[in-house]
Amino acid sequence: MTGYATDKDDVLRRLRRIEGQVRGLQRMVEEDTYCIDVLTQVSAATKALQSVALVLMQDHLGHCVADAIAEGGDVATEKIAEASDAIARLVRS
């Protein structure tokens, strides 16, 4: 079971909304919309994706990492390193 199982419907709903935002961006570019207006919408889509990433990270830490820590040993060390790497990727993006 994935860590985000309890939030799966919410995550999917958010991703569908983001998909619509991206299609709207494509339309804006096709229609030669003013650059700043397109950039504003890119920023909104980026923030929406970051919000989804935070939900997934929170669920991962609360479920997958917590379970691994309870198990202990190499599994815990591996999950903590994996989560740390994922956080670093999110911060860099």
Image (cartoon, grey):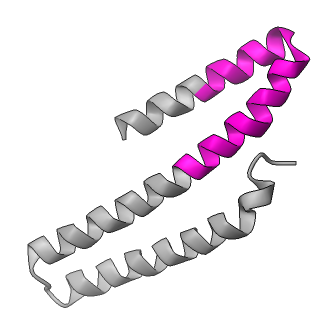
Q: Give percent across and percent down for residue 60.
A: 70, 39
In the image, the segment drawn in magenta is 54-83
The one nearer the camera, 28 or 15, is: 15
Quadrant hosting residue 86: top right
In the displayed structure, 12 sits above or below 77; it is below
Horizontal side of 71 relative to 35 (left or right) equals: right
Majority secondary structure of magenta residues = helix
Q: Residue furthest bottom?
A: 31
Residue 63 magenta-drawn?
yes
In the displayed structure, 84 sits above or below 49; it is above
Horizontal side of 8 relative to 70 (left or right) equals: left
In the displayed structure, 37 sits above or below 83; it is below
Question: For the point 81% across and 19% down, which residue is it?
Answer: 69
Image quarter (top left, top right, bottom left or bottom right) of the C terminus: top left
Question: For the point 67% across and 20% down, which residue is it?
Answer: 80
Question: For the point 15% across and 77% down, which residue is it?
Answer: 37
Q: Give percent across and percent down for residue 83.
A: 62, 28
Q: Give percent across and percent down for residue 84.
A: 56, 24
Q: Give percent across and percent down for residue 74.
A: 81, 10
Quadrant hosting residue 14: bottom right
Residue 58 magenta-drawn?
yes
Q: Residue furthest top?
A: 73
